[in-house]
Image: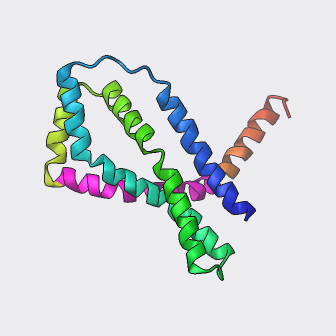
């Protein structure tokens, strides 16, 4: 059970750190054109659908871990846990959506947002939006493997460097 709570704590901590940083951004006064472009871009990006994908991506590892830890748990308990996890993550949606809006207006002009809308309406743009959640999930899954490969090499290099400087 401890590892499930560790996983939940990790997800919550990562989410809260990201959201607190994003929430701290000053909301700039936007022009009506920029606001209209933002609404159109977020609609084209299907933020609601993306959010659902993100919630499932965060919830699935927790649920898989719970299933392994409690393989004999009754179905109603599994459904109850799933409901709690999904509800808890779902409560973050308003903050995430407003944070995405602030980030988009921070980094894109109204014209650039219109360019993105035009791109997302092309077959390649639609495909990129459809693949984005899966690509992000696969990239996140690769991160531990990459860290395992890089970290020992980096540690050896740092040790050699610091020894060479007389610090170790």
Colour scheme of the picture = rainbow
Residue 70 higher or lower than 116, as above or below: below
* Helix, strand or loop for the magenta stretch, by majority: helix
Q: The N terminus is located in which quarter?
A: bottom right
What residue is drawn where x is 55% and y is 54%?
143
Q: How many marks do you count on the picture?
A: 0
- Asked if residue 135 can be seen in this view, the reply is no
Residue 122 picture location, percent across and down: 13, 50
Give the magenta part as a residue range: 124-149
**Does 58 appear in magenta?**
no
Q: Is residue 44 left or right of residue 139?
A: left
Q: Is residue 31 depicted above or below 97 in this figure?
A: above
Residue 126 colored in magenta in the image: yes
Foreground pick, 125 / 101: 101
- Locate residue 12, reporting x and y percent: 59, 47
Tell me the quarter of the picture where residue 63 sits: bottom right
Q: Residue at x 37, y 29 (%)?
A: 102
- In this image, 74 relative to 140: left or right? right
Which residue is at the front of the view, 105 or 66?
Answer: 66
Q: Is residue 54 above or below residue 18?
A: below
- Quick one: which residue is furthest to the bottom in this view? 72
Q: Residue at x 22, y 18 (%)?
A: 31
Q: Quadrant of the C terminus?
A: top right
Residue 137 visible to an observer of this rendering: yes
Task: Report the side of 31 relative to 73 (left or right).
Answer: left
User: What is the x, y in percent for residue 158?
Assistant: 72, 39
Query: Residue drawn 33% across and 27% down?
Result: 107
Q: In screen coordinates, is 155 left or right of 10?
A: right
Residue 6: x percent and y percent?
69, 55
């Amino acid at each position: 059970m401890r590892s499930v709570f560790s996983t939940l704590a990790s997800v919550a901590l990562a989410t809260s750190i990201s959201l607190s940083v994003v929430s701290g951004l000053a909301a700039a006064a936007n022009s009506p054109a920029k606001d209209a472009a933002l609404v159109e871009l977020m609609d084209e990006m299907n933020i609601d659908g993306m959010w659902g994908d993100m919630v499932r991506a965060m919830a699935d590892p927790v649920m898989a871990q719970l299933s392994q830890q409690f393989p004999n748990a009754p179905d109603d308990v599994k459904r109850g846990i799933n409901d709690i996890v999904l509800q808890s993550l779902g409560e973050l949606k308003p903050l995430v959506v407003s944070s995405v809006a602030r980030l988009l207006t921070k980094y894109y002009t109204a014209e650039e947002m219109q360019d993105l809308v035009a791109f997302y309406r092309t077959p390649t743009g639609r495909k990129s939006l459809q693949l984005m959640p899966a690509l992000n999930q696969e990239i996140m899954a690769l991160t531990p493997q990459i860290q395992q490969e890089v970290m020992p090499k980096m540690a050896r290099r740092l040790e050699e460097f610091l020894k060479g400087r007389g610090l170790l």
